[in-house]
Every structure is written in structure tokens, then in C-alpha cells.
Image (cartoon, helix red, strand yellow):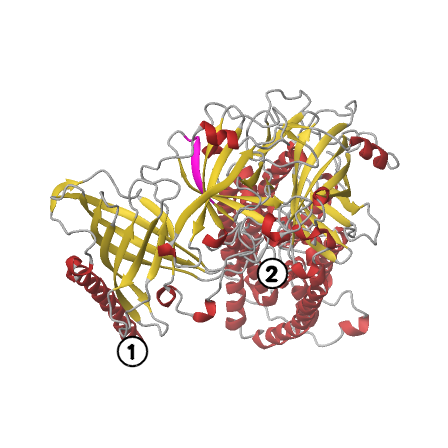
Amino acid sequence: MPMVMGSSAITSSLVWFNAFVLFLLSTHCTATEISYHDHCSIVPESPITAPEFASLPFPPFQNGYYDGGDTILNPNPSNYSVDNDQFLSFETQHVFRTDHESVFNVEGSLTLHFRNRNYWEDAGSFYSPRRSPKSSTSFSLKGFWSEYTGELCMVGTSSSYSREGKLLHLTAVLQLSGVKNSTITSLIRGTLRSLSSADDPNYFEPISVLMFPQTNYQYTKDSNEFKNECSGDTNVAKNSSLSLHLGRSICSVLEYPINTFQLEYASDCNSSKTCNPFGDDVGFLPQLMSLNTIQCSLNGQSLRFLMEFPNSVNIGFYHPFNPNTTFVGEGTWDWKKNRLCVVACRFLNRNSSLSNSQVGDCSIRMNLRFPAIWSIRNSTSISGQIWSNKSVNDIGYFKRIAYRSTDNNMLGVPGLKYEYTEIDKVRMSCSVKKHVKKSGENYPDGYSTEMRFDTSVRDSRGAVAWGYWSPISVGDQIFQWSSGSFMPLSSSMPESSSLEANTSNSKPLTISYKISLSPLYAERRTALFNVSSSGYNRRVEIFAEGIYDAETGSLCMVGCRYLGLNNQTLKNDLMDCEIRVNLQFPSLNAKKDGVYITGSISSARKKSDPLHFETVSVSSAAFYSGIERKSIWRMDMEILMVLISNTLACIFVVFQLLYVKRHPGVLPFISLLMLVVLTLGHMMLLLLNFEALFIRSQNRQAVLLGSGGWLEVHEVIVRIVTMVAFVLQFRLLQLSWSSRITDHNIQKASWIAEKKAWYVSLPLYLAGALISVFANLGRKNKVDEIAMQSSRLVDIQFSLWGDLRSYAGLILDGFLFPQILLNIFQNSMEKVLSPLFYIGYTLIRLVPHAYDLYRAHNYVPNFDGSYIYADHKADFYSTAWDVSIPLGCILFAAILYFQQRFGGRCFLPRRFRELEVYEKVPAVDGEE
């Protein structure tokens, strides 16, 4: 059978290898046999006369879109969706001169990408997006390009699979027009056609191709007349927009490929015809807009982009190109007015194929600026307006539409200020309750990095959301979160920025926050998220401002959340500002109850109000830098304790080996089950170490980085010492087993007693395991509550495997139990175990629990990944366990001591002591 399987595997490998070679040969042969002259007449074929040319008809990589190709890119019709994303990339590989002055030989590849809608599904989990299939097909092409006419014709091959799974050899001709110098209305259009007959399996329907030329682009709308048209916004005050430094370009600020914006329509917008930039044709009123950058100018002050208005709130991810809801725009930064002035054009012939598309009607105008003053009602990093310069009665006219960025991240443009407008309301709402400071307590400074944290949100039903809180300003200081710390945007920084600073004399600080929350599960989404229409998975953003008291660690704020388009009735209804936010930061020296930020988000509206939502609680683990440094010191100490513990285990086993060498007659009286438990215990430690090596969580990686790599060295040393202890323990087990087999005088009696010990021990062990399983099932519903206590996805999981590992540690704590049972059944008075062995091992199992009690009262409770000694994954640890387990260990050691001195049944009533006794036949000692 092995020979047959091996032969089959070799045959299969040869088949695949031959198929691969045939595919390469067929592709090469087909590519060389396709006649350019027979299929391309728009550009004449010309001989190559010069080496590779430096000028390219495309940039090295040119992106675009296509329509069609379902049979070769999406062979499964069930995967088809109107939201399929179909885009292409053209890579120019070589360009050669020919004997024709304006004709060039071109080699390149055209790759057609197909992707099903790939969003975070609203009905799915926050952590588990539904991924849809993605595929691509690449054509290797050769042909000629006419610089004079801008036409390109190429022939080439590719491969794909049919719906039946058969390999297809595709031959095609690509014809493009418009590959030349371009303006805003220029397009590269064309068709990819199959060279196979319609009844050939390799045939595919024609594919329409659309690209935007990027070579020698001319910004035709860059003129003073156009800039004057951009100044029609009368609502923007002078000096209310941030300016760019001379060394900073608009392209570097708008560096993201896709920037997302929320649209805000005027209050009198009651007609889709005059409000919708596309009229009644598209059938929906757009809520969002994205700017998809096409190209930046060499000086970085002008750029081209697509203005897309998809019918989806999931714009942050890939979405299909739709010319019916897309504008083509170009813009230039106006240094005098601190704004980007944009002119945009519509796609014409929108209902035809992409190869027939045209761009015209450049009557759309847009401006973009960076607001210089933020407030609770206006905390957007980018804002602007879109409008038409046509008359009201003209076709294509629409009213002004305001827009704002949805991410609201600070872009690093200096000069930003924050204006507090709701502080009086905060003082009124927070004057009733005030946290009383206890003596000796210090709280985080308002300027410290600890003011930025992740959080979990819960309502009365349980965990509903996950998010983060990021300060915008503290006092007059604007902050930006960068590389794990706060970076002030202005040059000055308050001196009292140290976390360790004594804040007893500090005054309350005004502070503003950006709170971003995303629901975990759609079916458990609270009313807090029902008004949101921005971003993926119905994310809600709350901008809040209030007062932070550094003497008591209390933070009280008033918040505003943006409303979705469906909740807007008037322009003033864009925000719900009846939100109250309260937080309590823990003390810097908090120990007993852990370091947790707690608080609530509530609505000040009446329950009958449609915008009212249930009060939700906020919880987050505060990772103070001082406490983290103390934890690193604790971990270094635990490293030494683990090494000492494992080394002592080796020494105690060596003492027992020397003891049985001097007294070989005691070997048959040692419990095999006890030795098996100890041996498996060392094996379990090895497995846990290797699990930490290969399946290491992100938290564990953070611990390793924070300790300077010393933990990596520790893991290697611990594995070596544990391996030595395992080998020594296994040797002791082997000696005891051999003595049972070779000593015929007591073989039968010892095996009977051993079996009785197994019959009693194993059911007890099994019963304990079942109790652990049922306890795990009972706590399963509480996993979310415990895991969400930490803001860094703490690896606290009540898994069945984790409980069984802890139970195995409990069995190790009671390692003397099988020996005690064996002594009872044998009624032996033999001193089978060296006192150094069983007392030493008892101390090894006892000390971790005593240390855990000390750690719980002197260190902040931390995540399990940082516990090296007294690891909670390897035993049961709590106040109750840490007291009861050591008492049990001491009790077992005391019983064994009296058994070895007065007999195995010395602690039983007298009538049980006179039962059958197994006499030991003295063995001749080898040394005598």
C-alpha cells in the first residue's frame, strides 16, 4: 500500500508538472503565432529600429475600469452582484522605436481585477467581516502605439477557468484610443475582444475599457477667472481656514487614495431635482461623497480626482465604479484664500458601454478648505461646498451642498484652535455630584497620554460596542495622536505634562474629546447607533467638551453626535447635542480594585423623544506608564523565580534518585500514578512554553517588546531546565516500573495495591474534570463581560482547554494523593520517599499561591500574558484557592510523614489497621 500511495503521489506530481509546462509552452507559442497584421489595422506594424525608448504612452502603472468579462472572471453566476468592483491595471514593460516616426512598439500586461462586495456587513460581527471572492486575469500583450493619433493596438494571451473548471487559453486584441496628451475631458477608451470564434470554449464577450490619461496632463482650468468663481461662499469668514506652509502641498495633505465626506443639504431642499447633483435619474439622494485621487501635479499643488457618490454607507471600502454617479474633477490650491478650487465635469452617454463614454458639461464647482477653529458643533478637518454655476432653469442645475469629512482626523496642518462653547452647560450639569479625593491619591495629568484610551460600551443587555476616546484639546493646547503619544500642534507645551506630577494644586482643565464607537453586533445595537449613517457598520461619532478635575480624576462633558440623513429635518438638526458624558479615572496608585476607567453616556432628552437612547456604561483598562514600568520589574523578578523553581525541581528529583540508589528496595512501593502525574506535569509545562512560542497573542508580543527581549532568553532557559526535570522524573518512573516487574516476591501484592489506588484516584480526577467542564459552560455567557473589561483586547477567555489546564495544575498540587492511597492499601511503613523530595516538591507547589496573594495585594491586576510565575493558565488562582491549596499541600505532606513513620493506616481507626497487611520480603542490598 505505501508503494501504491507513493507511486500515485509521484504520478500526480508529474501530471501537474507536465500540465504546467504545456501551459507555458502553449502560452508562448500562441503569443508568438498571433498575427498582429491580421487583427490590428488602426496602427501600422513597423519594424523595430532602435533600443528601448524612454518615453511611455502610459505611466509604468495605469489604472482604470472595465465592464464585462463575467465568464472569465466570475464563472460562478451566484456570486454576481451589482456591487461587484471591476477595475484594471495596465503595466507598460517595454517601448521601442520603429522605422515610422510616430509609431512605437509596446509590450505590457493588462490585468482585469474582479472583486465582490467586500464590506463589513451590517448584520455581522465587528470582528469578523464577510470576505467575498476576488479574482484576476492578466493578458500579456504586444503591439504598436501611434503618438500622432493616440491609438494603441495590441494582441496577446491569457488563461482562465470555465464554469466547469476547465483551463481556458484566451487570445485577445486590445484597441485603445485617446492615449496622448490630455485635459479634464480626455478619456482612454477601448475594447478587449476575443480572437476565438463565438462557439469556441475560449471565447468571451467584448470587454469595455476606460482609463484616465496621465501623461502630459494639462490643467486647463487653472486661471484667475475660475478662482473668482470659487469665491462665492459667503458663509466663510476671513482667516477661518488654515493655510499650508510653502513646503507642504495639497497632495501630501490629501494623501489617502479615497477621502470620504458626509453631504449636508440645505433646509429648504425639498425637491430631488434641484437638490440632487444627478437629478431624478439615479433614484436616490446621495449621503456620502468620496474623492478618489487620480494624479497629482509635479509641484503638488494641483490634482485630479473622481468625485463619486455611491448609494451606500460603506464607502470606506471598495465600491464599484459608476459613471452615472461620478464627476471628473481637477483642482488647484489657492494660496491667497487658503482653499482648493475645483472644477468638475459630468460623464455623458452614461447608459452606454464604457468604451463610448465621454466627459463634458464642466459646470460643477467645488471648494475645499481646512477649518481653523473647531468647536463641539464643528469638529471637521475638511469642509467645503459643491454647486452648479448654471441658472436655476437650466438642465443639470442643483443647489449648494455642504460637505464635511467623516473621519475628522487632524491632518497636521498647524494653526488649529478649539473654541469651547458649552462649558457653562457643563458646570450646571456637573455641580451636583463631585468625587471626593482620598488622601494620598494622585490622578493622571490632563496632558498625559493616558487620557487617550480604548473602551467598551454596555447597555442593560450586555456588550454592544467598542471604540476609542481621543482628546482634541486640553485647555488651549491642540493635540494629535501620533506614534503612541500626544503631539502638540502648537509650539508651546505646559510644564506640568508629566504623568508623575503632583496634581493636588492643579485647577480643573477644559478638555474636548472625539469619541468613536462601533457596534459589535447589529442585532444588539442600541438606539445610540440608530441615527448614524456614516462609515462602516453604523459607526457613531460623539464630539464632547467639558471639565477634567485632576485632583479627583473626574471628567464631566456635554456631547454632540451627528445625525444620519434620514433624521435631518432642518439644517440645524444635523447634530444631537443633548448628550451627557461622565468618566472617573482611577488613581495612579490604585491596586486593590485594578486600574479601570468607568463612566456613562446618557441622553438628556425625554424618553418619548425619537432621539432618546438608553444610558450606556463605559469601561476601559487604564494602562498607566508608571504601573507598566512596575509590571516590567515584577516580570523580571518572576523570571528568576521560575528559573529557581525549575532548578530546585531538578535537584529534588536528583535527591530521590540518589535515595533509591541507596535503598533500591523501596522502588516497588513508590506510586506509579504519582510519578506519572509528576512526569506529565513537566510535559505540560513544556507544551505551554511551546504554545507561547508558536501561538503568541498580540498582548504577549507587547510584553516581550516592553521587556527588552529578556523574556525571549528566559523562555529558552526555562525550556532547557524543564526538559532536564522531565528526563529525571521519567528516569525515576522507569526505575520504579522495572522494580515492579523484576521483584517477583512482592510483584502481585504491589500491583493489587497499585490498582486499588488507581481505582480510587481516576474516578475522582474524572469527576473533577467534569465539574470544570460544567463550570466552564456556566460561565460561557459571561465571557463578553469579562473580556471587555480591558481596552486592549485582553486575552481573557474562559475556554474549556484553559479550565482543563488549570485543573491539571490542581492535580499536580495534590501529587502526594496517589502515594497516600498506595500506603493505605499496602499498610506500608517503608520510607519510600526522601523527605527532601516530597517536602521540597510541596514547597514548589505551595510558594506560587503564596506569591499570588502577595501579587494581588501589591500590584495592579494585569493581563494573564504578563504572569510568568504563578501563571493563571497553569493552576487555579484566587484568594480562596491560594489559601485552600497550600493548606491541602501541607496536609498531604504531614499525612505522608506520619505514614512513613507509623504505617500507612496510622490515622485510621484501630479496626481498619488490622486488615490484610502485605509483608515486604527484604531484598539483598547490592552495597552490602
Of all residues, the one furthest to the bottom in this rendering is 1
Callout 1 crowding tier (Cα within 10 Å): few <14, some 14–19, many ≥20? few
SS at badge 1: helix
Tell me where residue 738 appears, x and y as whole percent: 50, 68
Furthest residue in direction front, as rendered: 393
Q: Residue 66's image quarter?
A: bottom left
Viewer-proximal residue, 163 or 666? Answer: 163
Numbered label attached to residue 608: none
Image location of residue 356, percent across then percent down: 36, 55
Q: Residue at x 32, y 50 (%)?
A: 90
The magenta-colored residue range is 300-306
Disc nearest the viewer among 1 and 2: 2
Depth check, front residue: 45 or 422: 45
Q: Residue at x 88, y 36 (%)?
A: 432
Question: What separation in Å lies between label 1 and label 2 (alpha carbons)?
Answer: 47 Å
Indicate the amino acid at tag 1: Val
Q: Position of residue 741 (x, y in %)?
A: 51, 72
- Residue 615 part of the magenta segment: no
Please name the residue that numbered disc 1 is placed on.
4
> Where's residue 685, x and y in %?
56, 55
Is residue 872 found left or right of 78 in the rendered image?
right
Left or right: 778 as drawn, with respect to 327: right
Q: Which mark is residue 124?
A: 2
Q: Quadrant of the N terminus?
A: bottom left
Q: Is residue 829 visible?
A: no
Q: Residues within 10 Å of mark 2 (few under 14, many from 20)?
A: some
The residue tagged with tag 2: helix, strand or loop?
loop
